Amino acid sequence: MMFEGDQFFREGDYHAAQAHYKAAFEEDQKNAQAALKAAQCLWRLSFSTEAMDWLGRAIKADPKLIEAYVTMADYQAQRYNFLVAVRILEQARRVNPKSSEVYRGFALVELRRGNAKGAATYGKKALEIYDNDVETLITLAQASLAMRDPKMAYNYAKKATEIDVNHRKAQITLAESVAGIQGIDAGVDYFLRLVNNYPWLTSTVSPSANYFWPTSAISRPKRFSGR
């Protein structure tokens, strides 16, 4: 069930994936990963309340599964429930005080509520524990963009892409950093070169693009997606 669910997830068929993950959890209600992945699918399908319920099941099945706490906190932050998100992460920190995931979670919550400086502080703490975490590096890059420091953003994003060249968000954040340093045209040109090698990049542009790339600049590379 998990294997099939993972296949559907990679293909973007979240409806089929969540059904397989739920079935896997029903077979083994200690399978916290199945509950977590079901929640992630449900969130992508905009079933936010049900997603939260499945995250609760994941935590109940394995109270030490930090990823479930961090995911729940992020979802609460996306709903602007920042205080709830912080409380969830505090609970996770009590479970594992030395988890880089927890500090990354704090960083993302701070970034979502517009506190880029706070996000950078927590992100750096996460890197002190684990310095090759791609998601933390991306969060730090986005925080740097928000603080109008594209050179620092470039450094973080570049390292993220060196760790995982196929990471969509890392590549897009790197392109945004190039735009911040060299101008929008340079950023768009860099993005277009990426599209030639990684066509899937055309399907998304991260929120931090709003400052460096006006709508016209963001839409420009999308028109090249068929080439």
Image (tube, helix red, strand yellow):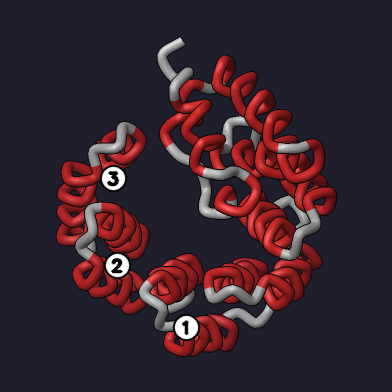
**Image quadrant where one finds the N terminus:** top left
Q: Would you say the residues marked 2 and 3 are in contact, meaning their CB atoms lie under 8 Å apart?
A: no
The mark lying in front, picked from 2 and 3, is: 3
Q: Is residue 125 visible?
A: yes
Q: Is residue 99 visible?
A: no
Report the amino acid beneath label 1. Answer: Phe
Dot 1 falls on a residue whose secondary structure is helix
Q: Is residue 115 left or right of residue 128?
A: left
Q: Identify the residue at image location x=23%, y=59%.
A: 46
Dot 2 falls on a residue whose secondary structure is loop
Could you tell me residue 72's position as x and y percent?
Answer: 40, 72
Residue highlighted by disc 1: 82
Report the amino acid beneath label 3. Answer: Met
Q: Identify the residue at image location x=21%, y=51%.
A: 18
Residue 30 tag number: 2
Could you tell me residue 199's position as x and y percent?
Answer: 48, 21
Dot 3 falls on a residue whose secondary structure is helix
